């Protein structure tokens, strides 16, 4: 059984008809995770709890009970999202032994809708990175070419879906961490509007930029997952009360008359010519669907990477202050004073990239520099937000590349943080404005690596994005599978 061949809807229908058993689907997921352990995508396998839940579902199906919408869906969850009683490292040594006492709202909702969590996925430490090379638990390999990165920071969550270990997964996206790995691994990834999905139970990185969202093998499945996780949550004061539409039912709408904006700033210098060609070809396909294409401008794009790295690091330096060895997680062995214990714990517990960001963020927030850096960055952030508002007065959705290149080699950028940060050039703007965006595969390079296209919508217009992506997916007809998995012993 290849999990990638089963949509969420088909799993539910097969289970209800008695043609498939949840326990068999679950065993397939567990075996595949074991077979492909060398990809290092999974940090914790949850066999016992998953099989027990699968048995419960099978009993319910046998009794003829009506099955929940995600019955049969095998799910993996990024390790920065907590599940009660299951170790959550956040990709960091400082949480190597942390067992959370509560479950994230998004996971609770998915479980209530019938999904079965089979594992926790590897990621960059505290979601800081674009390659998953910053995990304290080793690099994740791209199933399309195991010498290459899967993207980051939700690399493990992209890989499990791409390689058929699970039906879907959850990731987090602060500056592109769902969309860039989705692009690098040839799967669908969705970052909802800020506030659409509760962040309760997500380890905070940059709280004003953090989002939870799904990875899936088809747009329809991403719509099913979003439908289950969206909505207000009293545990997250930034979650929105805007009503949640039926994303799945709306997928069939037509695109006739839709205006697709193409921002010129996203197709300039630094964009790999092959990526450019593929993305432009995919955009032209919108015309076959009756949509119109117009040129637009997002003039403050060039400031997005510096603004993002000021705001994200400033918020991170404050959010990460809680890891001090006192209440939970790793504590350094020695230390003659409390201060020394804090220092050693943080020195030994955090990796190099996290330390770099804490220092950058602390500097940007320090007295005397605050207005010059953090204050200024906030002002430019509002200009970027204004760019999007103006653009959406001219068009309905915006289409762009996801990243400047296809998946790069492991080790290629790790010693050059600036180059690594430039990976995020087309994704961070979207987090700064809080608007939703979806990524889907639109082709492959001559080297056989997937290329993604990003569609961006106005606040709370996920339905419009999903419908556009679903129609585009059909006309693109991308059906290649990762070829390198055989090479993994
Ligand atoms: N690559 C970006 C960073 O390193 C984005 C990470 C994310 O979205 N979590 O901050």
Image (cartoon, rainbow, N blue to C red):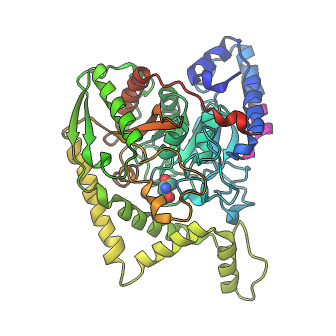
Q: Position of residue 273 (x, y in %)?
A: 38, 42
Quick check: 323 above or below 412? below
Residue 29 percent across, percent down from the top left: 72, 31
Q: Residue, x 55% and y 27% (percent of image)?
A: 480
Q: In the displayed structure, does residue 170 sit left or right of residue 434?
A: right
Determine the image quadrant of residue 303: bottom left
Type of secondary structure dominating the magenta stretch: helix
- Say whether residue 47 is magenta: yes
Q: Which residue is drawn at 30% across and 20% down?
A: 288
Please state, as top left, top right, bottom left or bottom right, where the C terminus lies in the image.
top right
Question: Compared with residue 355, is residue 194 higher up or lower down, i.e. above or below?
Answer: above
Q: Which residue lies furthest to the front in this view?
A: 446
Examine the rendered structure and indicate whether residue 146 appears above or below residue 420.
above
Residue at the (23%, 54%) spot, across then down:
299
Taking depth in this image into account, of 432 and 267 the one nearest to the observer is 267
Q: Identify which residue, 123 or 237, lies in the foreground.
A: 123
Magenta stretch in the rendered image: 43-53
**Quadrant assignment, res 15:** top right
Query: Can residue 442 be seen?
Result: yes
**On the rendered structure, is 319 left or right of 307?**
right
Residue 176 rendering spot, x and y as whole percentages? 46, 50
Q: Identify the residue shown where x is 46% and y is 22%.
A: 477
Look at the image and tell me in which quarter the N terminus lies: top right
Closest to the observer, 287 or 367: 287
In the image, residue 66 lies in the stretch drawn in magenta? no
Taking the image as shown, residue 225 lies to the left or right of residue 142, namely left
Image location of residue 308, percent across then percent down = 39, 61
């Amino acid at each position: 059984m290849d999990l990638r061949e089963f949509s969420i809807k088909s799993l539910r229908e097969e289970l209800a008809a008695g043609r498939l058993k949840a326990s068999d689907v679950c065993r397939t997921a567990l075996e595949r995770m074991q077979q492909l352990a060398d990809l290092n995508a999974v940090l914790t396998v949850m066999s016992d709890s998953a099989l027990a839940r699968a048995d419960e579902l099978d009993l319910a199906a046998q009794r003829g009970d009506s099955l929940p919408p995600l019955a049969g869906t095998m799910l993996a969850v990024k390790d920065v999202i907590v599940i009660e009683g299951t170790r959550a490292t956040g990709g960091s040594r400082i949480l190597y032994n942390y067992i959370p006492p509560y479950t994230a709202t998004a996971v609770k909702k998915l479980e209530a809708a019938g999904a079965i969590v089979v594992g926790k996925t590897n990621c960059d430490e505290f979601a800081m990175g674009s390659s998953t090379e910053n995990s304290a638990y080793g690099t994740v390999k791209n199933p399309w070419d195991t010498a290459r990165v899967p993207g980051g920071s939700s690399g493990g969550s992209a890989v499990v879906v791409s390689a058929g270990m699970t039906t879907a997964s959850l990731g987090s996206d602060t500056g592109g961490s769902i969309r860039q790995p989705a692009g690098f691994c040839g799967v669908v990834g969705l970052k909802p509007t800020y506030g659409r999905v509760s962040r309760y139970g997500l380890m905070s990185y940059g709280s004003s930029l953090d989002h939870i969202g799904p990875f899936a093998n088809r747009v329809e499945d991403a719509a099913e997952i979003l439908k289950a996780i969206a909505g207000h949550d009293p545990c997250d004061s930034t979650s929105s009360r805007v009503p949640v539409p039926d994303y799945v039912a709306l997928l069939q709408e037509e695109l006739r008359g839709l205006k697709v904006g193409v921002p010129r700033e996203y197709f300039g210098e630094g964009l790999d010519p092959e990526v450019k060609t593929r993305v432009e070809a995919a955009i032209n396909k919108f015309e076959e669907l009756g949509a119109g294409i117009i040129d637009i401008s997002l003039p403050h794009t060039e400031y997005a990477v510096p603004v993002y790295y000021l705001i994200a690091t400033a918020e991170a330096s404050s959010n990460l202050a809680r890891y001090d060895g006192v209440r939970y997680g790793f504590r350094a062995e020695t230390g003659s004073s409390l201060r020394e214990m804090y220092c050693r714990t943080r020195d030994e517990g955090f990796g190099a990239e996290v330390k770099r960001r804490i220092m950058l963020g602390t500097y940007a927030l320090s007295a005397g520099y605050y207005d010059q850096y953090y204050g200024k960055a906030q002002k430019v952030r509002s200009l970027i937000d204004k760019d999007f508002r103006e653009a959406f007065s001219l068009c309905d959705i915006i289409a762009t590349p996801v990243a400047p290149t296809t998946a790069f080699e492991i080790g290629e950028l790790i010693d050059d943080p600036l180059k690594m940060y430039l990976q995020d050039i087309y994704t961070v703007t979207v987090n700064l404005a809080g608007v939703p965006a979806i990524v889907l595969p639109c082709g492959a390079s001559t080297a056989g690596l997937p290329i993604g296209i990003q569609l961006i919508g106005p606040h709370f217009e996920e339905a419009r994005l999903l419908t556009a992506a679903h129609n585009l997916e059909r006309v693109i007809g991308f059906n290649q599978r990762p070829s390198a998995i055989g090479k993994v012993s």
